[in-house]
Image: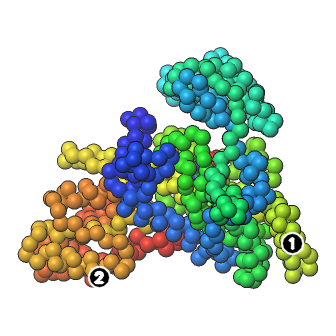
Amino acid sequence: MAQEDVFKKIVSHCKEYGFVFPSSEIYDGLGAVYDYGQNGVELKNNIKQYWWQSMVLLHDNIVGIDSAIFMHPTIWKASGHVDAFNDPLIDNRDSKKRYRADVLIEDQIAKYDEKIAKEVAKAAKRFGESFDEAQFRSTNARVLEQQAKRDALHQRYSDAMNAGPDLNELRQIILDEEIVCPISGTKNWTEVRQFNLMFSTEMGSTADGAMKVYLRPETAQGIFVNYLNVQKTGRMKIPFGIAQIGKAFRNEIVARQFIFRMREFEQMEMQFFVKPGTELEWFKQWKETRLKWHKALGFGDDHYRYHDHEKLAHYANAATDIEFLMPFGFKEVEGIHSRTNFDLSQHEKFSGKSIKYFDPESNESYTPFVIETSIGVDRMFLSIICASYQEEQLENGESRVVLKLPAALAPVKLAVMPLVKKDGLPEKAREIVDSLKFHFNCRYDEKDSIGKRYRRQDAIGTPFCITVDHETLNDGCVTLRDRDTMKQERVAISDLCSLIEERVSIPSLLKRL
Ligand code: ATP
C-alpha cells in the first residue's frame, strides 16, 4: 500500500477510536487545531510522564516548573521573536492559496532527490546483486544531471535564506524552477512577504490602555526568565537543568500533515545551564541521552536519524534534530540546540537585572551557557501512532488492525471480559477490575463476541486482555491474552497485578535508559 494511503488510514483510525478529533468539528473544524479524545489523552499523558520522569526523576540536577502562557511582551522583544520569528509567505493569485516560499523550494529539492532515488532503485533492480550504487551515482549521466541541478538549487536557496532572507531572490527561484501551485496548477505568484508567527491579544481594559501580549510561541522563555528564581530557591549548582511541559502557539502559514504542524500544540523543553566552554561536551551528551530515550520505545534503530544543522541561528554554536521515519519521510520530532548565553544575556540587557551565576569553585561570576532539548508532544504522539499501526493477516483468514504501542504508553493496559453476561461471571470480572484499577488503567467489556472484543482492544493498543469463564469461579484463574503474539495462558487472579504492572509501568520503560 502506498505510504500516503497508510497515512490516511492512520488519521481516520485516530478519529474512529477516540484518539484525535478535528477541533470544533460540528462547526466544520478550525484549521490546524485538534482535540484529543478519550484514548488520545491517555496516550498523550503517558508520553508526557515518560519524558518528565526521565528528566526530573532520573537526574537529581534537573527540576521542573510550570510558567504562565502570558508573559511580559518585552520578553519576546528580547528573545528576538517580535523582529525575527517570521516565515516567508507567497500567495497564488488564482487559487488564493498561501504557501511558505521556503517550503515550496524545499519540496522542489526533494523532487530532485526522489528522481535520483528512482533512477538508483531502477538500476538496482536491473543489475541485481552486482549493483554498485556508489559507482552508478558517480557515473550515470541522468543521475549526474539531476544531482547538478539539485545542488545548484540548494546552494542558491541557502544563499537566499542566509541573506536576510532575500525575499526577491526566493520569489525568483520559484519562478525559475517553474514551481506551480498544487491547487490551480499556475505560476501566478505574488511577491514574497515576511509573516510573524506569533498570535497576539490584548490584556487589560482599553480605558486604561490595553497592553498587547502574545501567546507564547515556545515554552523555553518561561524557563529563562525563571532561571534566577529556580537557581536561588532550589540552591542549584551548575550544571543543572529546568524542565517544562506546556502549550505553545504558532500561526503556521501552511498547516499540513494532521497533528505534525498545528497552531496550538504542546512542547516538552529542558534547558540545561552549563559553564561557558563546556557546552559542546554537554551538547554531545544530551544528543546521545535524548536518542536513547526515543530508542527505548523499541520501534527499531532504523526509524531515527540525526540531522545536524548546516545553517545555525546567529546565537547557536551547534544544533541537531532527531528525525523519525513517518509515512511521509524522515521528519523532525525533537531539536537539540547549543544556545550559548544568548537568551540570558538578552534578558539581562532588556530587564536591566543581572542574571549571573557565582561559581563557588572557581570564585568567578558568569552568564551560563545553555543546551536546550525541545520536543513536541503532538509530533511524538504522531510518530508513535504511525510506528504502531499495523494491519495483520491472521492464520484463520481474518485480518486485524492492531496498534502495537509500547505497553507503558498504551491508554488502556488491561481489558477484563466475562465470557458470558450471566452465571456470576460479570460480577467476578468487575471484582477483578475493582482490585486492579488502583494500579493501572483497566476497562470492563461485556458486549459482543470475545473475538470482536479482542479486535476493539487491539485497535486501541491494549497490551493485555483477560477472559473470565466458568472455570474461573472454581480455580481462581483467568485466560490472559497478549496483544502482539495473541498467545493465551492461564494465570491466577492473585498473580495478575504483579505480572501486568511489571510490563506496563512507566518505570519499566525508564529502566531501559
Ligand atoms: P519546524 O521546522 O518543523 O517548523 P521548528 O524547528 O520551528 O520546527 P522548534 O522551534 O525547534 O521547531 O520547536 C521544537 C519542537 O516543537 C519541534 O521539534 C516540534 O516537535 C515541535 N513543534 C514546533 N512547531 C510545531 C507545530 N506547529 N506543531 C506541532 N509541533 C511543533
Whether residue 43 is situated above or below residue 511 in the rendered picture: above
In the displayed structure, does residue 162 sit left or right of residue 448?
Answer: right
The disc, 1 or 2, on the residue closer to the chain's N-terminal end is 1
In the displayed structure, does residue 309 sit left or right of residue 489?
Answer: right
Q: Marks 1 and 2: CB-CB under 8 Å?
A: no
Residue 183 can be seen, yes or no = yes
Give the class, few, some or many, for how many residues have Cα within 10 Å of label 2's Cα (few <14, many ≥20).
few
Whether residue 79 is situated above or below residue 173 in the rendered picture: below
Label 2 C-beta lies within 8 Å of the nearest ligand 1 atom: no
Q: Secondary structure at mark 1?
A: loop
Q: Nearer the viewer, residue 382 or 493?
A: 382
Residue 275, given in percent of the width and then of the height, sits at: 83, 69
Residue 288 can be seen, yes or no = no
- Residue kind at label 2, given as amino acid type: Ser
- Residue pointed to by mark 1: 354
Q: Nearer the viewer, residue 110 or 99?
A: 99
Residue 223, given in percent of the width and then of the height, sits at: 70, 67
Image point 49% across, 50% down: which residue? 33
- The residues bearing labels 1 and 2 have C-alpha atoms spaced at a distance of 55 Å
In the displayed structure, does residue 341 sit left or right of residue 46?
Answer: right
Residue 113, given in percent of the width and then of the height, sits at: 61, 29
| Camera-side mark, 1 or 2 | 1
Image point 13% across, 75% down: which residue? 425
Residue 259, given in percent of the width and then of the height, sits at: 49, 49
- Residue pointed to by mark 2: 435
- Residue kind at label 1, given as amino acid type: Ser
